Amino acid sequence: ANKFYKFAAERMARWGIENVRIMRADAEFFVKKQLAPNTLSALHVYHPDPWPKKRHHKRRLIQPLFVDAAVKALKPGARFALQTDHEEYGEQIREVILAHKLLQKTPYENAHFGTENAQVQTNFEIKYLREGRKIYRLAAIKVE
């Protein structure tokens, strides 16, 4: 929705953060079709839609073809971090990420990438932690 895009853009401007680009677009299309190879130092995906019904799992963002495109866009040594509150989707994410030959699991916490104390405090994260939900996190680096 436009309100989230505007909120994020205003927050980055207020904080004086200039190394962020915000785009309102479909993440799958953006990563697969818009990103040049070896350009990202990090890619973070927070709380993608879990599409919980089995017949809808094909709509999930984290699938092998998406991960292939993401890895292509990552520079060697770049970080791919993901989090969800959906346990089963978290397992699927783990399987897909760890099965990729160019990704190697790394500690989730990394202050350089904004994930200090295992929290980034997205609106979803704040809401879900208040509700007592568990957050499933995974980070990997691109190796070559």
Image (cartoon, helix red, strand yellow):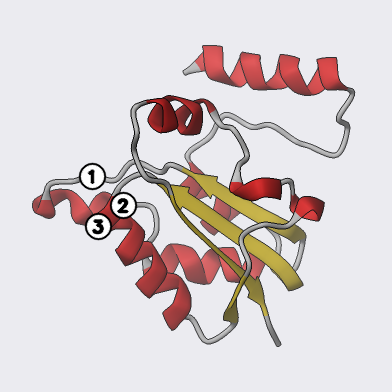
User: Can the viewer see residue 115 in this picture?
Assistant: no
**Residue 65 coordinates in the image, percent (x, y):** 41, 68
Foreground label between 3 and 2 = 3
Give me the C-alpha separation between circle 3 and circle 2: 12 Å
Crowdedness near tag 3: few (<14), some (14–19) or many (≥20) residues, C-alpha within 10 Å:
few
For the point 73% across and 14% down, which residue is it?
10
Give me the C-alpha separation between circle 1 and circle 3: 11 Å
142 shown above or below 3: below
> In what element is the residue under mark 2?
loop
Give me the C-alpha separation between circle 2 and circle 1: 6 Å
Mark 3 = which residue? Answer: 88
What mark, if any, has residue 51 been given in the picture?
1
Q: Amino acid at mark 1?
A: Trp
Mark 2 = which residue? Answer: 60
142 shown above or below 119: below
> In what element is the residue under mark 3?
helix
Foreground label between 1 and 3 = 3
